[in-house]
Amino acid sequence: MAPVAQLDRVPGYEPGGREFESLRARQFYGLNMDKKFLDFEQPIAELQAKIEELRFVGDDKTLNINDEIKRLEKKCTLLTKKVFSNLTPWQVTQLARHPQRPYISDYIEHIFTDFHELHGDRHYSDSPEIIAGLAKLDEHSVVILGNQKGKSTAEKIKRNFGMAKPESYRKALRVMKLAEKFNLPIITFIDTAGAYAGIGAEERNQSEAIARNLFEMIALETPIICFVSGEGASGGALAIGVGDRMLMLEYSIFSVITPEGCASILWKDVAKAKDASSVMGLTASRIKELGFIDEIIPEPMGGAHRNIPQNMRTVKERLLSFIVELKDYSIAELLEDRTEKILQYGLK
Amino acid sequence: MSWFGKLIPQKIRTESSKKSDMPEGLWSNCSNCKAVQYKAELERNLFVCSKCGFHSRIGARNRLEIILDHGSSFEIINDLVNKDPLKFKDSKRYKDRVVAAQKKTNEQDALIVLKGKINKMSVVVAAFEFGFMGGSMGASVGEMFVRGVRAAIKRSCPFIVFTASGGARMQEGVISLFQMAKTSAILKKLNNNKLPYISVLTDPTLGGVSASLAMLGDIIIAEPDALIGFAGPRVIEQTVRHKLPDGFQKSEFLLEKGHIDMVIDRRELKDSLHSILMHLMSNKQQNV
């Protein structure tokens, strides 16, 4: 962290002024990569910067400012609660896409054990856009798979920003068939802006790959839990999203297309994405109201990325409870319920 | 009416509306080769250009009329009310768009489903009306598709769909997305009953419709030169940032890449469908 004293020499510096605060905040989160703030979180960021700064000054024994720090921390908690109690769909979209939002790789690290990654569709490629493998959730062996957007630039490129290609879906289906054969429950992690739109993807029949997964997942003879952890957009998300239980993380989104895509088609202007998001009904709460998901998993205050351990504990606990619950059903019951539920979609 | 018109006594006035009763023109230009054709002749030719073979888009009713034996069909009536739970609004309200589309096409929504016969063989046929909001699939289309397949299962007969759609209907948000799963689910039931499902892809078939019911046919047929794909060409061009090769995502391209079984001329489609279904149904008893 840069010494506060240096800021005194920054042109335009005004003690306590807004310029100072935002500058300080920017410096603060610029230096602390684990706490990236979104635009609507600026007041929180500024308050946090102030607290950090006081802590720094607090080392100076001549001042006792612990009370002030406590007061500000309380204020910060209240402010965060206030901001997060009334998020717009666009703000939720930003959180769902937060660069520090946990990905399937984080869930693998934190809540599963004995993970063995399984590669490839057996026809064309490794398909790293979707991670798949065998894992243990406590004592339960399961098959997990899901979109991985990638963290570093190199990983993002390798994973095609989490946009799956036909071979990615075929790999997913291959691994799901494996789960079916050995009676392993499946957990899918959905986090994608959509299926990849490219020449090669079309040449290898993106449409068929998605359609095939929908068609097969409906009748897959093993329990399937679908968990939207971030962004679930278009048929590209649904292609690993047909199952017995559908869960969404509190600030995740699920939609027919990204708000940008919707805006560019209906408004003929990508810049209208915010407007589009407000009418698309893409938040977990709205989708729960519409009856398409079974449960919303609450996130730590400020979003999953603000408190990864807490988020992992909650998600693990909920996934476990659904794994246990689904074990009570016969396969015939599961398939009947799964199909009938899907056939009711849109009738309410 | 002009001030002059008003002066003319009513009995000898010529009502201006009568002008529109005049035929619009007996001739039309092929939009592909520009050849001039006699309209009645073009209609007899099922809107296929007799010079270059270009297949013009046709409406769902026309399509069904061409395929089904005359007087054999019963419509599965669409009595669904569009509920618009999202209260969706872009530059116009979705509700208003639906009303406008209903007025324009005289249809309830974008999928028309008929029970009927093809050369005396019982079938259920569904056809997308592209004129109704780009043939997009929302809750109504999804449910009508399910009803059509259910009717086919009940009659133990084949189910045929003619697709012409831009994809899922964005104004219905996630509801339209889930219609992809819904139509696939009912096709699984048809599949379990071992009844044939033939999808005939016509210009254009894209997005959520392509990535669900269109690509699940036991036999997949396309009309010549139809645009078929997951992402539209403009979207792909924006992604890859260069021009797409000629014929990309056209029927013949899909045939070459192994995505579809055959490309069939509209004028031969009915007999081909009948012949294929005779093979697939040769060991089945139909409940007519």
Image (cartoon, rainbow, N blue to C red):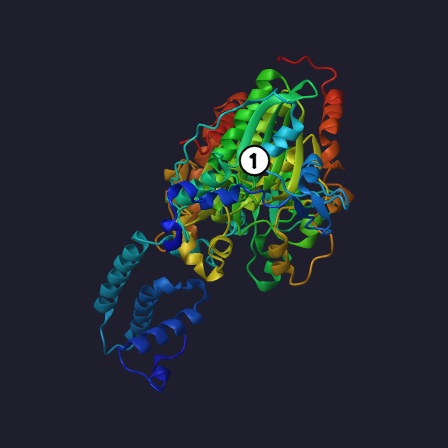
Residue A122 in view: yes
Estimate the x, y position of residue B57 in percent, counting from the top left. Answer: 64, 42
The amino acid on which the numbered mark 1 sits, given as a three-letter code, is Ser
Please, is residue B62 above or below residue A60 in the view?
above
Q: Which residue is mark 1?
A: A141
Please, is residue A278 above or below residue B82 in the view?
below
Label 1 SS: strand
Estimate the x, y position of residue A287 in percent, counting from the top left. Answer: 41, 41
Along the viewing direction, whichever of A146 and B288 lies nearer the viewer: B288
Estimate the x, y position of residue B15 in percent, counting from the top left. Answer: 44, 44
Estimate the x, y position of residue A44 in percent, counting from the top left. Answer: 32, 64
Along the viewing direction, whichever of A170 and B189 lies nearer the viewer: B189
Is A291 left, or right, of B247 in this rendering? left
- Residue A88: quadrant of the picture: bottom left
Q: Residue at x 73, y 15 (%)?
A: B283
Residue A184 in view: no
Q: Quadrant of the C terminus of chain B?
A: top right
Tally the marks: 1
